[in-house]
Image: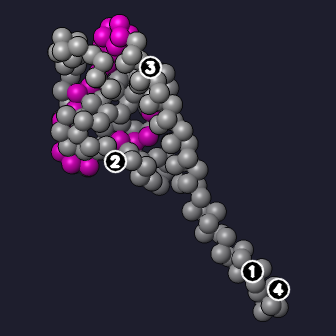
Amino acid sequence: MLTPLSDAERADLVAASAEQLYGAGETIVHEGEPGASMFLICAGGVRVTVGPNHQEVATIPAGGYFGEMSLLTGDPRTADVTAATDCQLLEITAETFRRIFLANPQVVEKVAAVVEARRAGLAKSREAAQAPATVEHAPRTLLGRIQKFLRLS
């Protein structure tokens, strides 16, 4: 994501961003909460979960990032993100993003493409998270059909 930035722009980004430390198991962002920042993972890794059952939809290692959907759209956070291990994160605020990234359209285009792909992936994951309830009932329905057909009930 940061490839199109110059060394000076990267240094400016780091200087303008806040380092955040999280211990393994700590929640970094909550699904449904407002968000105006994104995070770069400098060390450690995170788990991304959705829904009330906290279905894991992704793990993101060092070098990855999350939170860009809320940062770019102003929409609430679309998932819970929890530290899988002790993590060192760099939090980029919306103001820092505007100042540095909007001056470089290549970065904005790349992040926008990632946001769209991640939105589609989350939508599929949400559908899959609801599927177990449907699948759980399917055997009963199938069993009922078998029992009726064979006149076992």
Residue 57 x/y as whole percent? 43, 49
* Disc number for residue 109: 3
Amino acid at circle 3: Glu
Count the labels in the image: 4
Most foreground residue, 78 or 10: 10
Separation of marks 4 and 3 at Cα, in angstroms: 57 Å
Of the two numbered discs 1 and 3 in the rendering, the one whose residue sits closer to the viewer: 3
Q: Magenta region: which residues?
A: 76-104
Of the two numbered discs 2 and 1 in the rendering, the one whose residue sits closer to the viewer: 2
Q: Is residue 14 above or below residue 144?
A: above
Q: Earlier in the sequence, mark 1 or mark 3?
A: 3
Q: Residue at x 30, y 18 (%)?
A: 4
Separation of marks 2 and 1 at Cα, in angstroms: 39 Å
* Disc number for residue 149: 4
Q: Could you tell me which secondary element the residue under label 2 belongs to?
A: strand
Separation of marks 1 and 3 at Cα, in angstroms: 52 Å
Separation of marks 2 and 4 at Cα, in angstroms: 46 Å
Of the two numbered discs 4 and 3 in the rendering, the one whose residue sits closer to the viewer: 3
Residue 45 x/y as whole percent? 25, 44
- Residue named by callout 1: 144
